[in-house]
Structures are given as structure tokens and as C-alpha cells.
Image (cartoon, rainbow, N blue to C red):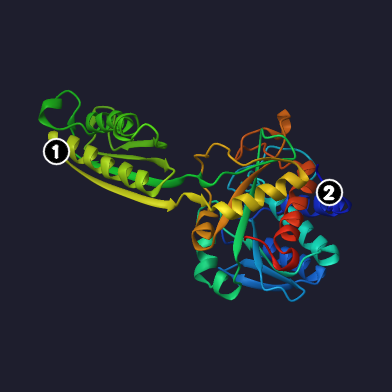
């Protein structure tokens, strides 16, 4: 049976904080207002605050009792370079910037949990509240870690949560192992020999070569990966220097690849290089391939995942074996450094709250603030009770 939601009395405050963040979105590491506001609120709760971690990251530390166990809770702070089309009163005031992924809600939930834990938290140990910059471009977690995040604020385990449109409110899901995919960006530059459109035999048309490569790349997933492995190869750009009657001598293919294991990602890269090299060699031209893995897969550890689902069951419904997701998440770097769990929390199933993440009309559901913040509270009190459990 679910327990009463401990943070229900804080809903109005959390809603106010969330709307403020939504009105003032900031990007990447340019989070001066956002990080200052987070630090201000944590200070007002009586939490020890550290700023400038990984450029503009904020860390709050709350110790109760003499317990030596510790737990890290992470929220992301950055917005997206999208022009908001919503017309409600707290819509973005900054052109071409908006919280289209719900990070405004993530901050508000963690702040609500922090305030509750200061005033009413029943635990023995240390909570480290991590507010991370630059999640969307995959640089913030690594920057905070490189700046000594887990050396200065050691934790036994770390947890991250993301809202999920289309998942009912009060529902939480996770899985042991690969939770989200790696993301790699690739570019294939074809250097051929252009010429007159009426005399194709006298040159080598880069479009023809590129088109062969585009088609062949689709065989990586369908024919080169073991069927039980998950992968995506998407060509998202095809640019040439051709003109109305000029065959292009140069073409650039660009795109995005996803995989749930480093081994699958390595296979995709190796096969891509073979395909590009083989096809261009057959046409007696050259190709240059770059393949940059910017997000590793998020790998959930067994004990933290079990802990998260136990806490989720206390405040809602928990699915401990959801399907892996092929989107990517910067929390992967934290889960690689410390045993961790990344979980999803329902944003609702109505049309207004089931719109895709990163859409220009997206909005975090205020009704999810209490379940999300209450989850954080239950997790802390569960794991740090009487000195802690199997974190």
C-alpha cells in the first residue's frame, strides 16, 4: 500500500519554482540565473551549498545524525534552443530557448525534496543534491566529475530521474543493465570528381556514391548486428557542392547512431568505415569518416535499481523491468563513476502532457511534482535509515 505523499504541502512552492525556471530558460553552461536561483533556494533551506562545480553546477550537502552512508540525487538544469509556442503565463521569455525536456520540473522536484528533508527528514547519513548543467549536449556530467564531484562529495550510489510523456502520473520505471543508449554523431566526406551534368562518364558523381553509401548503411542494423542487439543508424544530412548542370565532386553525409552496449557501438562504427571505404574504393574516389561517441549507454546497477523501485512502490506504481530506451542521457557518466540508477517518472497521458520531449509545445506536468519529490524523500529515508541499506 502506498504511503501518503510527504511533499504534498510543498506543491505550491514547487509549482512557483518550476514556473520561474520555465520563464527563464538557459542553455548548456550559460546558466548564471538558473544556478544562482538553485543555490539561493538551497541556502534558504539551510543546506550547505557549493557552486561552480563543472563551471556552473551546484551541489547541496545535507548531513543528519552520525551515519556514514551517503546518497547522490541528480537533477539537470539546462534548456533547449527551441522557440516555445505555448501561450500560458509562464512561457519562456527568451526567444529560441525553452524548457522542452522538463528539466524545470526536475529541479523543482529535487528542491522540494531537499526542503522536506531539511525540515522533516528521518534519516541518518548524508544526502548530496547534484544540480547539473549541460545535459542536452552531453558535457555537464563529465565536467562535474572532472571537477572532483565524487572526490569532494563521495556517495555510495547516485540516482537520476527524468519525466516521461505518455507514462501515467505516479508510475515509475527502470531496469537493471542498459537503460538508455549511447549516441554517436558521424560524418562521411566523399571526395570524388565532379563534372558536366551532360558528361557524367568524364567524372565521378559524388551523389551517386553517397546514395550507395546511404543505402548500404541500413544493412548495418539489419544484417551486421546480431538480431538481439539494439541499434539505430540514421542519416540526417546529405550536402553536396553540385549546381543546376554541375555534378558534385564533394558530398557530406551526416547522422546519428544509437546502441545499448559499447560493443554494439564499436561494431556500428567499424562496419560504417568498411562500407564507406569499400564503396568509394569501387568508384576510385576517397572518403573521410569521423565517428564521435558523445553519450555512452546508461547502465543501471542492480542494487540501486532495486532500491529505486522499492521507493517508487511506496509512492506510486513501479515497473522494475521496462524496455530499454534508445534515447541518450548524460547521467550515463555518473552511473559509470558510481553505482547508480536512472529511472523514468510519468508525465501523464492526456494530450497536453503526452507531447514528445523536445517539442515546441512541451510542458512538464505540475501534477507530477508531488510524486517525483516524494519519491526522492522515500528513497533517502529508505536507504539512510539506521545507517543505510544496500546502496
Between the C-alphas of marks 1 and 2, the distance is 64 Å
Q: Are marks 1 and 2 in contact (CB under 8 Å)?
A: no
Q: Quadrant of residue 304?
A: bottom right
Which element is circle 2 on? Answer: loop
Which element is circle 1 on? Answer: helix
Label of residue 317 in the image: none
Sequence-wise, the earlier of marks 1 and 2 is 2
Q: Residue furthest top?
A: 198
Label of residue 5 in the image: 2
Q: Residue, x 62% and y 35% (percent of image)?
A: 356
Residue 302 versus residue 116 in the image, above or below:
above
Q: Residue, x 69% and y 52% (percent of image)?
A: 106
Q: Nearer the viewer, residue 358 or 302?
A: 302
Q: Residue, x 67% and y 36% (percent of image)?
A: 361
Q: Quadrant of residue 34?
A: bottom right
| Residue 75 drawn at (x, y percent) | 65, 56
Residue 96 versus residue 123 in the image, above or below:
above
Q: Is residue 92 visible?
A: no
| Residue 95 drawn at (x, y percent) | 65, 47
| Residue 283 drawn at (x, y percent) | 14, 34
The local crowd at label 2, few if under 14, some if 14 to 19, many if 20 or more residues have their Cα within 10 Å, is some
Q: Determine which residue is flagged by label 1.
A: 281
For the N terminus, which image quadrant? top right
| Residue 239 drawn at (x, y percent) | 34, 37
Amino acid at each position: 500500500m502506498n504511503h501518503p505523499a510527504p511533499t504534498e504541502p510543498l506543491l505550491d512552492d514547487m509549482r512557483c519554482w518550476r514556473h520561474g525556471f520555465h520563464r527563464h530558460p538557459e542553455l548548456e553552461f550559460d546558466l548564471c540565473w538558473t544556478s544562482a536561483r538553485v543555490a539561493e533556494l538551497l541556502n534558504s533551506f539551510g543546506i550547505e551549498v557549493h557552486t561552480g562545480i563543472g563551471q556552473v553546477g551546484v551541489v547541496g550537502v545535507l548531513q543528519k545524525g552520525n551515519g556514514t552512508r551517503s546518497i547522490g540525487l541528480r537533477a539537470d538544469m539546462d534548456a533547449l534552443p527551441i522557440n516555445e509556442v505555448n501561450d500560458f503565463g509562464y512561457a519562456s521569455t527568451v526567444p529560441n530557448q525553452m524548457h522542452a525536456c522538463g528539466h524545470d520540473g526536475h529541479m523543482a522536484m529535487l528542491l522540494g525534496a531537499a526542503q522536506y528533508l531539511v525540515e522533516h527528514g528521518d534519516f541518518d547519513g548524508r544526502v548530496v543534491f547534484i544540480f547539473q548543467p549541460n545535459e542536452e549536449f552531453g558535457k555537464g556530467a563529465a565536467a562535474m566529475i572532472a571537477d572532483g564531484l565524487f572526490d569532494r562529495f563521495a556517495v555510495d550510489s547516485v540516482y537520476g530521474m527524468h519525466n516521461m510523456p505518455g507514462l501515467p502520473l505516479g508510475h515509475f520505471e527502470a531496469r537493471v543493465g542498459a537503460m538508455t543508449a549511447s549516441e554517436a554523431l558521424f560524418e562521411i566526406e566523399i571526395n570524388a570528381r565532379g563534372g558536366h551534368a551532360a558528361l557524367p562518364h568524364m567524372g565521378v558523381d559524388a551523389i551517386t556514391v553517397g546514395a550507395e553509401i546511404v543505402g548500404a548503411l541500413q544493412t548495418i542494423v539489419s544484417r551486421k548486428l546480431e538480431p538481439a542487439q539494439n541499434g539505430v543508424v540514421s542519416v540526417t544530412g546529405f550536402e553536396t557542392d553540385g549546381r543546376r548542370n554541375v555534378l558534385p565532386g564533394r558530398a557530406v553525409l551526416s547522422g546519428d547512431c544509437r546502441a545499448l552496449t559499447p560493443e554494439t557501438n564499436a561494431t556500428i562504427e567499424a562496419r560504417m568505415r568498411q562500407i564507406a571505404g569499400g564503396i568509394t574504393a569501387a568508384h576510385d574516389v576517397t572518403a573521410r569518416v569521423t565517428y564521435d561517441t558523445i553519450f555512452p549507454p546508461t547502465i543501471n546497477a542492480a542494487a540501486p535499481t532495486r532500491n529505486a523501485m522499492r521507493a517508487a512502490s511506496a509512492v506510486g506504481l513501479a515497473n522494475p523491468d521496462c524496455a530499454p530506451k534508445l534515447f541518450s542521457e548524460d547521467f550515463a557518466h555518473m552511473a559509470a563513476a558510481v553505482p547508480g540508477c536512472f529511472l523514468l517518472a510519468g508525465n501523464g497521458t492526456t494530450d497536453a502532457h503526452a507531447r514528445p520531449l523536445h517539442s515546441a509545445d512541451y510542458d512538464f506536468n505540475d501534477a507530477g511534482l508531488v510524486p517525483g519529490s516524494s519519491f526522492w524523500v522515500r528513497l533517502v529515508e529508505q536507504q539512510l535509515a539506521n545507517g543505510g541499506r544496500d546502496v
